[in-house]
Amino acid sequence: MTSARTVSVGGVDLGGGAPVRVQSMLNTGPHEVAAAQAQIAELADAGCELVRIAVPQADSLPFLREYVQTSPLPVIADIHFDHRLALGAIEAGVAKLRINPGTMGDWAKVDAIIDAAGQAAIPLRIGVNAGSLAAEVAEYRDLSLAEKLVESALSFQRHFEERGFYDIVLSVKASSVPVTIAAYRDLSHRSPYPLHIGVTEAGTAGTGSIKSAVGLGTLLADGIGDTLRVSLTADPTAEVAVAWDILAALDLRRRSPELISCPTCGRCQVDLIPVAAEVEAGLDALAQQYPQAAGLKVAVMGCVVNGPGEAREADFGIAAGRGRGRIFAQGQPLHTVPESELVAALLDTIKKSF
């Protein structure tokens, strides 16, 4: 989005005008090879573009090498506390490391990581969060948490630059939406590097999706953010789905057609809820078969107040009433069918346009 610099993660560009990239993180242990590989494949199918793996101990490293060799997505290693794990992950061939210098103990260990990453020509994400600020910044009583996050990230950035390392991605995550927004807004004006955005520890699928949509949607609408992860206490594929929904809501990127469907009320004369759900599932399947379908706008309307007008404004649509519905294409009414045939007729009409 707004970052001036471009960083490449295994051939996937971040920043410098590249699309906002979607990433997630495995919730399998590194030793669960079959489960981890299956989850990577599921994430790739769901639209994930970068996958992160926790590397908690040294005996995880041989498995990490296998994931790097077999993954269809660039693999990012997530390292804390032990710099030797970071060095081992670089040797295993990861496309990027996520570290927080504040958890590594001392600068000599961080410098060893910086030098190894430079030799391997891979980027490093400086991932600062509220629980691991730079030691000297954490003591500043006159700074807000958002300000401490930013000052920590910038102090680490300066150290990396002094070592001659510029292949940097920054993040300043908090579980508070207002703190997250304030921190990234400030950082976006003070650093040229790509920003990985996220509301950390956002919560379960329901509340976490809302917090992420509010926080990340606000930042993206401001033009802030080059890659994102939606952090949910849920299956990682759900994180990817929510991330794409956020991007689609802002017309930044899409994987499926845009569905416009009216809220049900007493004027609705068809059972619109299952109709809309069936259309949505059908459109998702259609987009997998016909990628060009992702740019379509499809309306499913259930009454005469807004139905005909909205359906005409969409590429395709249904304007329903009294157990029947009229199919529209490019603003023109085509034919009227019974409620039981609405979805099939709509999807068939869309397919015939390709």
Image: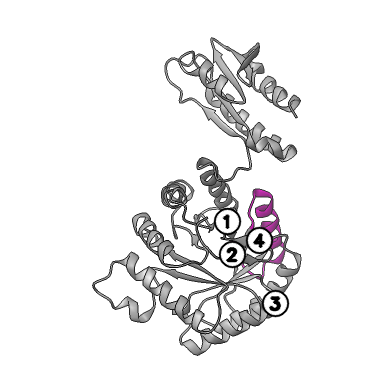
Please give the residue where the numbered disc 3 appears in the rendered image: 92
Q: Is residue 320 above or below residue 352?
A: above
| Circle 1: residue type | Gly
Q: Which mark is residue 17?
A: 1
Please give the residue where the numbered disc 2 appears in the rendered image: 6
Q: Is residue 162 magenta?
A: no
Look at the image and give the residue range highlighted in magenta: 26-49
Q: Are marks 2 and 4 in contact (CB under 8 Å)?
A: no
Please give the residue where the numbered disc 4 appears in the rendered image: 12
Q: Is residue 35 magenta?
A: yes
Q: Quadrant location of residue 13? A: bottom right
Looking at the image, is mark 2 or mark 4 nearer the viewer?
2
Mark 1 nearby-residue class (10 Å; few <14, some 14–19, many ≥20)? some
Colour treatment of the image: one colour
Looking at the image, is mark 1 or mark 4 nearer the viewer?
1
Q: CA distance from mark 1 to mark 4?
A: 12 Å
Q: Nearer the viewer, residue 155 or 98?
A: 155
Outermost residue on the front side: it is 4
Q: Quadrant of the C terminus?
A: top right
Residue drawn 72% across and 63% down? 71
Place of residue 276 in the rendered image (x, y in percent of width and height, measured from the top left):
57, 27
Q: Is residue 223 above or below residue 83?
A: above
